[in-house]
Amino acid sequence: MKPAPFEYARPETVEEVLSILAEHGDEAKILAGGQSLVPLLNFRMLRPAILVDVNRVAALDFLEVDGDILRVGALTRHLSLELSDAVRTRLPVLRRAMEHVAHVAIRSRGTIGGSLSHADPAAELPMMARLLDARIHVRNSGGERVVDAADFFLAPLTTSLEPEDLVTEVRLSLPPQGSGWAFEEYAQRSGDFAFAAVSAVVEAPEGRIEDIRLAAMGVDETPVRLDAIEEELRGRVLDGRLVDGAVELARQSVNPNTDLKASAEHRRHLMGVLTRRVITQAVGRTGKAAA
Amino acid sequence: MNARERIVTTVNGRRYEREVEPRMLLTDFLRRELGLTGTHVGCEHGVCGACTVIVDGHSARACLCFAVQAHGSEIRTVEGLGTADALSDLQEAFRKHHALQCGFCTPGMLMTCVDVLEKYPLADEHEIREALSGNLCRCTGYEHIVRAVAEVANKRRSERA
Ligand SMILES: Cc1cc2nc3c(=O)[nH]c(=O)nc-3n(C[C@H](O)[C@H](O)[C@H](O)COP(=O)(O)OP(=O)(O)OC[C@H]3O[C@@H](n4cnc5c(N)ncnc54)[C@H](O)[C@@H]3O)c2cc1C
Ligand code: FES
Ligand code: FES
């Protein structure tokens, strides 16, 4: 299990990356953390003619709060998100999600740009992108465009990216301070890809839900927003009957697959269990400062 | 196609200069080019942890990294821990608690421990198991490994206090 031969380029600027991609088109592959790409190369499921290693493009590696936006450079490592003070205090839901991504030796290399571009339907960052209304900045030699997370993920391992595109930045919208949040995942072993996960951020200052965002993964072709449930809960005070209704809606609104790991029925069941936990926890955490 | 790339890298404090094919994995570079066979190879797709080494201060899978990418990097492998006569505290704890049987997983376990002992509090057994969950051992049942790591974590904590 060794990769087929390839040419190797190690550009240091975004412009150089874009010109190499423009020249080689679908013969080229971007190499970021390599945590999804290198296994595919080792198995020879992919045989690109040239690898464009972006690990030394310093301009892609940043993490900063800009008003109510968290700006994340595409090369930001999973571990940097996990250990960031800004993430811990302003976006605890993301921190909790990162703790579920693989293991430290993989988090130290894997990047947000790589995770979104790889688009595994059971990966945490694509789900966070949906939950936090990410705006994904994409460049190619022709210019820049900004893609909403809602339009970015098309199918398992398929995004709206073209071969000559480079994700440069991901902008996540920060919930107001004091918002409630929750992230619950079911996986067979710690660090494994999940069977299913659900997450939420909620504003409910006086007990009444003013705004809520809910997302799920592992239960559909792509990570999903649970708009119908959000709609149902907005403006309401949470009670048992409302939660039961949301759980039922959650189970109905997804299209899980049966695969070697879990049946569709099992995943649908988990969807209900996790939704119940997440809504209750998120509303319960409202107004409490991050740990 | 097969143009070789010159790389300079520091492994366990020693500087090496070599020419490598871009497709050479860091595992093969360490084992074949440098003769450092302590770094083991299990799955070659990131799941078993046997090949874990420290690259520029963070644990990483050597099987998911190309040698060319290590140009300018500092790498630590199991050979950089103690020697047979002077084991590191972690190695000594593994010996004392029988934390290895066949030893295949041990280099990866040790290098993961070196990293997580610095990054995480490892205050209880749950945290230790979580931190080691990316390293598979087919022999020990993990119980003894967890004990060894707990001992080192506790000792380091009391030294810091
Ligand atoms: C054992 C194991 C367990 C794992 N468990 C989990 C898990 O539980 N949850 C999870 O979410 N992930 C998991 N992962 C995957 C991990 O998170 C990867 O890091 C991530 O999916 C890919 O990021 P990367 O930076 O490594 O990308 P790479 O592997 O370098 O690239 C992945 C793909 O994205 C493209 N790409 C990379 N960067 C860009 C960019 N800036 N613009 C455009 N295209 C780009 C590449 O060309 C390639 O097609 C696991 C991986 C392993 C090996
Ligand atoms: S050989 Fe690298 S993780 Fe298994
Ligand atoms: S001691 Fe044999 S695999 Fe761990």
Image (spheres, coloured by chain):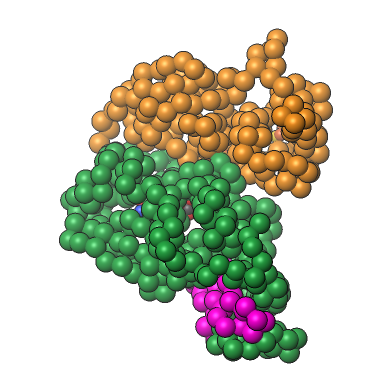
Closer-to-camera residue (B103/A123)? A123
Q: Is residue A145 left or right of residue A244?
A: left
Among the chains pictured, the one given green colouring is: A
Q: Position of residue A239 (x, y in %)?
A: 73, 86
* Residues in magenta, as a range: A201-229
Q: Is residue B66 left or right of residue B156?
A: left
Q: Position of residue A102 (x, y in %)?
A: 58, 51
Q: Is residue B81 left or right of residue A36?
A: right
Displayed quadrant of residue B6? top left
Residue at 59% across, 75% down: A202
- Image quadrant of ligand 3 equals top right
Q: Is residue A266 visible?
A: no
Up/down of A150 relative to A63, above or below? below
Displayed quadrant of residue B50? top right
Closer-to-camera residue (A88/B56)? A88
Residue A224 magenta-highlighted: yes
Q: Is residue A130 visible?
A: yes
Chain B display color: orange
Residue at 50% across, 37% down: B63
Q: Position of residue A63 (x, y in %)?
A: 43, 52
Up/down of B80 relative to B110, above or below? above
Residue B128 magenta-highlighted: no
Image quadrant in which the C terminus of chain A is located:
bottom right
Up/down of A206 relative to B8, above or below? below
Q: Position of residue A273 (x, y in %)?
A: 71, 74
